[in-house]
Image: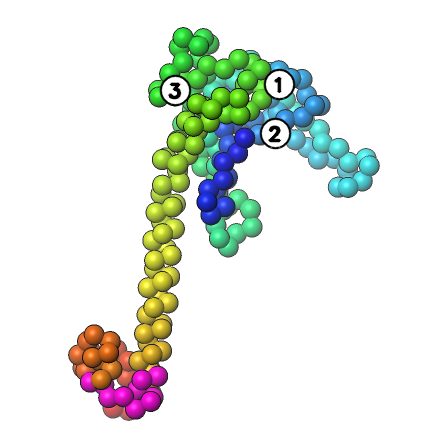
Amino acid sequence: MGYIDDEGLHEARLAPEFLDGARGIGTMSGKVPNDHVIVDAQYVGEPGSPSAETRYASRPAAEVIGWRVVCECSTPTSYGAVSNWVSDLLVRVPTAALEDLAAGRIYATDDQTAGWLDDSREDVADLAVKIWREQHLAIPTALGRLERARWSVESAQRALDAAAVDARTAGASWDAIGRAAGMTRQSAHQRWAHLTTELV
């Protein structure tokens, strides 16, 4: 199961992890045993041709030591992911009695682990989304708002400059322009005289 932010710039998933750091790639196939996690996919042959196939590398689900929330991050101007974010490890525990989601300890059978754990357990899905939103999305969301606010200010500044030039070109005095812009005549002149190509 995957999660996408409201702007479509962040796509996260809960990835099973092995002791050596290898992770499941977030796909399933009838070509691998049900108790395995796919860790790699190789595309062989010409796309669209009858001989094209996908070959999978998989590992036993019993070897999964935990999960990480993995996010592929892009920007409004990029095509595809430009960076990745990875959460701390959510540790797999051997019995249900040891599970403590708040502490990042999850119990899952091999069957659950081989599939999408967050698809079969709503509580785990909620935890993954909470981690993703609080530890990762909060920063880019706030920075995105800040960047959009800056763009708005810059756009408003350009509109203000253009309006001041238009007013002066139409014959308005610096005193009238200053009053309309909420500043003194002298401040208006200092700010916009160079844009009106006056020699004053």
N-term mark: 3 or 1:
1
Identity, as a three-letter code, of the amino acid under mark 3: Leu
What residue is shown at x 71% (from left), y 35% (from top)?
Answer: 43
Q: Residue furthest right?
A: 50
Instruction: Tell me the element at label 2.
Output: loop
Instruction: Tell me the element at label 1.
Output: strand
Q: Which residue is mark 3?
A: 101
Q: Say few, some or many: other residues with alpha carbon within 10 Å of mark 2 (under 14 / 14 to 19 / 20 or more).
A: some
Q: Residue 32 at x, y = what percent? A: 68, 21
Q: Which residue is mark 1?
A: 36
Q: Is residue 138 above or below residue 126?
A: below
Q: Marks 1 and 3: in contact by CB < 8 Å?
A: no
Which range is magenta? 166-175
What residue is shown at x 80% (from left), y 40% (from top)?
Answer: 49
Would you say the magenta stretch is mainly helix, strand or loop?
helix
Q: Which residue is mark 2?
A: 27
N-term mark: 2 or 3:
2
Real-space Cα separation, disc 3 to disc 1, in angstroms = 24 Å
Q: Residue 112 at x, y = what percent? A: 55, 17
Q: Say few, some or many: other residues with alpha carbon within 10 Å of mark 3 (under 14 / 14 to 19 / 20 or more).
A: some
N-term mark: 2 or 1:
2
